[in-house]
Image (cartoon, helix red, strand yellow):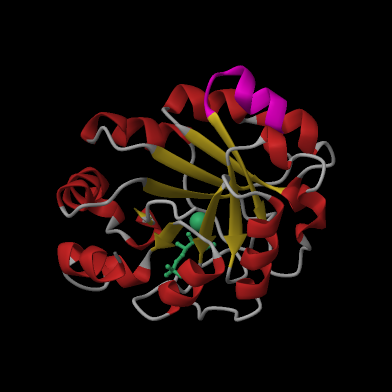
Amino acid sequence: MMKDIKIAPSILSADFSKLGEEVISIDKAGADWVHIDVMDGIFVPNITFGPPVIKSIRNKTKLPFDVHLMITQPERYIEDFVKAGADLIVVHAESTIHLHRVIQQIKSYGVKAGVSLNPSTSPEVLKYIINDIDLVLVMSVNPGFGGQSFIESSIDKIKEIRKMSETIDIEVDGGINDKTIKKCIEAGANVFVAGSYVFGGNYEERIKSLK
Ligand code: DX5
Ligand code: ZN
């Protein structure tokens, strides 16, 4: 079963001094979701933004907010991100001891739940939770920064996850451009984060070239 391809530009590569306008621009350019990278300087070696910034751009678009939490113990902040306007909350399997519990916590607010895996993490960690979640986010770079190059072993990982579930959304994040996206689609992924690629050119042309 082939799923529709969705493009989620990452605002990590946007101009933060005019974030609201940037969100409006990617919406007009044909984005399907807005990918929002939250980093705490502990789980990853970089710091970005939190709930107040997300809340400030919530009324700029009706597109779903795909909130990627790269923070230690995300269970401490789920409610804050729900209130800020998240439609999907993605937590890292490596960031919490109680992954099952966090997933239930996210779903208790009626928002979608996703789990992300670092490049070195095996999809085996998904075995007992895959039926509880809406999406798996395969990191195809080490999380923390935009503009890194695609790690090839992600392709086999996508294939393995697609074998585990025909229906789940598989999102790929890191080093996605008009070339790397092809291999990921063939492997079974259907949602694509793109930061430096989309924001590094004409937004509409870049999103079209990915689709
Ligand atoms: C990296 C973030 C990504 C990042 C991707 O930690 O999770 O979403 O913005 O950037 P590109 O598309 O430039 O690799
Ligand atoms: Zn991300």
Residue span colored magenta: 103-111
Magenta residue check for 22: no
Residue 130, horizontal then vertical, whole percent: 71, 42
- The residue depicted at 65 percent of the width and 49 percent of the height is 165
- Residue 134: quarter of image: top right
Residue 12, horizontal then vertical, whole percent: 40, 58
- Residue 84: quarter of image: top left
Q: Nearer the viewer, residue 193 or 129?
A: 129
Residue 147 can be seen in this image:
no
Report the label total: 0
The residue lying furthest to the front in this view is 1
Magenta stretch: dominant secondary structure = helix
Residue 11 can be seen in this image:
yes
In the displayed structure, would residue 164 be above or below residue 62? below
- The residue depicted at 39 percent of the width and 36 percent of the height is 54
- The residue depicted at 68 percent of the width and 38 percent of the height is 74
The quadrant of the rendering that contains the C terminus is bottom left
Q: Nearer the viewer, residue 54 or 168?
A: 168
Magenta residue check for 104: yes
In the displayed structure, would residue 94 be above or below residue 182? above
Residue 172, horizontal then vertical, whole percent: 52, 62
Residue 182, horizontal then vertical, whole percent: 42, 75
In the displayed structure, would residue 143 be above or below residue 85? below
- The residue depicted at 37 percent of the width and 30 percent of the height is 55
